[in-house]
Image (spheres, helix red, strand yellow):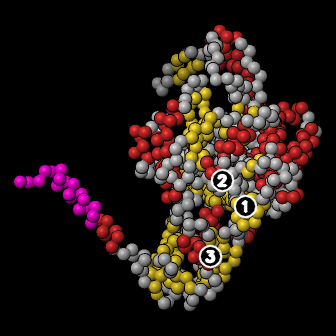
Amino acid sequence: MPLPRRVLVASTLAGAFATATAAYLLIPDKSRSAPTVNDASLSPSHFTRSVLTSSKTSGPDTKLLVLTVPGFSKQQRPGHLAPIWSVFIKDDDIQVERPYTPLQGIDDDGRMLFWVKQYPKGEVGRWLNSKTVGEQVEFRGPLTTWAWKEDDWDHIVMISGGTGITPFFQLLHSAFTATSTNKRFTLLHSSRTPEELPPPEILEPLGKYAASHPDNFALHLFVDGGDRAAHTGLRLGRIGKKDIQNCLGISNWFWFRKPPLERTLFLDDSGSRWPSRKEFLPGRGPPDFVRESMNNSDGFGFDDAEIKLSDEEWDRLLSHKRRWCRLQPLVEARGYRIPKEMHPDRIDDWKVRPRSPPPDPLYPHLLEGLRVWDKRPVMLKLSRTDLWEAAISEHLASIPDPDNHTIPFYDLITFPEEPDSEFQWCIIVTPRLTDCRYSHLDTFKDLVDFITQVLEKGVCFMHRYNVAHTDVARTNIVWDDRPDIIPDDNRPGPKPSLVSRLFKDKPKTQRKYWFIDFGLACSYPTFEERGLVKGICGQHKNIPELSEEVAYDPFPLDIRQIGEMLTRDYVGLYRGLEFIEPWISRLRQDNPTDRPTATEALAEFQRVTRELSEEKLQSRLYKQGEWPNLARNTTIVLLVWFTLNGVFFWYNWDRLHAPLAVVSSLGDVNVSN
């Protein structure tokens, strides 16, 4: 009896899949089986031996390496090398190869200069950094990364971060060493700190060419934080939409709008071997990806890359999602409603990885919810019981002090230990307030009030009760201007009528800031029992005392973190904050004993701001690149323009509407109104 058609199709597909799998696993990769030659010829199809002739440390995790091909001569240089090309360097220990871009190509003596970063999970990078001068390294290439024609583009805009600058430097080096070029290049590069900027071997040639050929090349360097004193021309903050608009010749205002330069190419370091490319067609506006990037983000920084989760992070995300699904009945029984996708019936949805990470993939332990009886938005957080976060949060929230601006503690939900979990968990319930990453400052007075509350109501209060937060950052401060975050009782009040809501005066409110996230906090019973701690904690990794081996005092760490937060997220973002920079420098002293205490920092800040006039306090805060009073001045210009046009048309109405004589092709004269 013949087999059913479905069985035949399934068998055929299974056989094809098995054949493809066997071929993938058993047929050797051509690159790995490529031979190694003993001469100095270069080719993508074989490996060439080179010697490490120079190794120089250029940053915290980076080195400048020079590989030299013995016996290389000018005649062996491959012809017609592309402006951007790379070679594959092979790790002989594990037989793995990775692409690297020689900064200046290969010279007549066979030398290639590389800028290499050692990543925690980068096998070849670690292997290269461990090599010493005189050791042998095998590579194959050159391989074309990007081929172009001289007349294809008029303007090339490049955005890079970290070692992603290397292909762009190679492109610029190729263009600058040519006899002449009529191209316009713009490079925007971002690093976390000044110490992580590219070395002088990269920046000095770029700076010299930008100074001598301003019409052909512009260089803009950005750092997320750190001291700019040792580096001139640095911009503190992220690569913002204004910077990209200025490079592309785009204006937000329709009467000033003009298309970008003709034939503009946009290149950005996408973290892969090839820079991603976007083309600007002549006479058209920016492509969708640039428009969306400028409209939906605060700017491009070194860490503004697509989030790629490791296997460990994926396991953690799926584990938390399944845990939320299992706990949904318990959470609902306690009077809280969570999203519908967190339901026991949906637990199987989180056993495999989704096609793309869900929103906020790095925070699967957080979940937004609703308190049923009063419809109040809440935040539910899974917390490990061994970290004592719940105990510290509840302790701080219970202190009856008017300076207490630690997040109110609504509820603690405990549940039985999970046999398949390494840790015991609990759920902390707090109000859901607004993240300080969103705009929350309008005037200088708002900024002064924000810093005052962070110090007086936050850090001073916690230190007074012997608690160090150790993770002071903008993401761990939330705000709200409702007067009833902490309800007086558990009974909902009467619902106001429509008339009362329309005519009742709105109460004057003051924006309040609250500290959240005490997962890294240190708490001590008394001042005398304060101790030292170890560990690299918090979101600011450039603080010198952080160490896994040498103990440090956590309380001065809070002060340094305030300085880092203000430098990166406020001084670098807003104009006119020079008056607090000397005070911030005091907070950012490398020696913890040179920093003021929280109380001293507050007193010094109040002395600085006491000299500000009321006019200054009430004036608007402008971000870097914004035009002061632009909206007001533009409105005045438009009103004047429309008024003058109206007067002109009124005065010349009769003249403009006079009959016109129209001469036809046959010579007849017609009168037309």
- Do we see residue 436 in this rendering? no
Q: Is residue 604 magenta?
A: no
Q: Nearer the viewer, residue 105 or 472?
A: 472
Q: Dots 3 and 1: beta carbons under 8 Å?
A: no
Q: Which residue is mark 1?
A: 534
Give left or right: position of 44 versus 587: left
Q: Position of residue 50 (x, y in %)?
A: 56, 84
Q: Is 262 drawn above or below residue 50 in the view shown?
A: above
> Considering the image in quadrants, where does the C terminus appear?
top right
Local SS, label 3: helix
Of helix, strand and loop, which one carries label 1? strand
- Name the residue located 61 percent from the left edge and 27 percent from the top edge: 376
* Three-letter amino acid code at the position of disc 1: Lys
The magenta segment: 1-19
Report the number of discs. 3
Sort mark 3 into few (<14), some (14-19) or many (20+) by Cα contacts within 10 Å. some
Mark 3: amino acid: Asn
Within-10-Å neighbours for mark 2: few <14, some 14–19, many 20+? many
Quadrant (top left, top right, bottom left, bottom right) of the N terminus: bottom left
**Is 173 placed above or below 494 here?**
below
| Nearest to N terminus: mark 2 or mark 3 | 3
Q: Badge 2 is on which residue?
A: 301
Marks 1 & 2, CB-CB < 8 Å contact = no
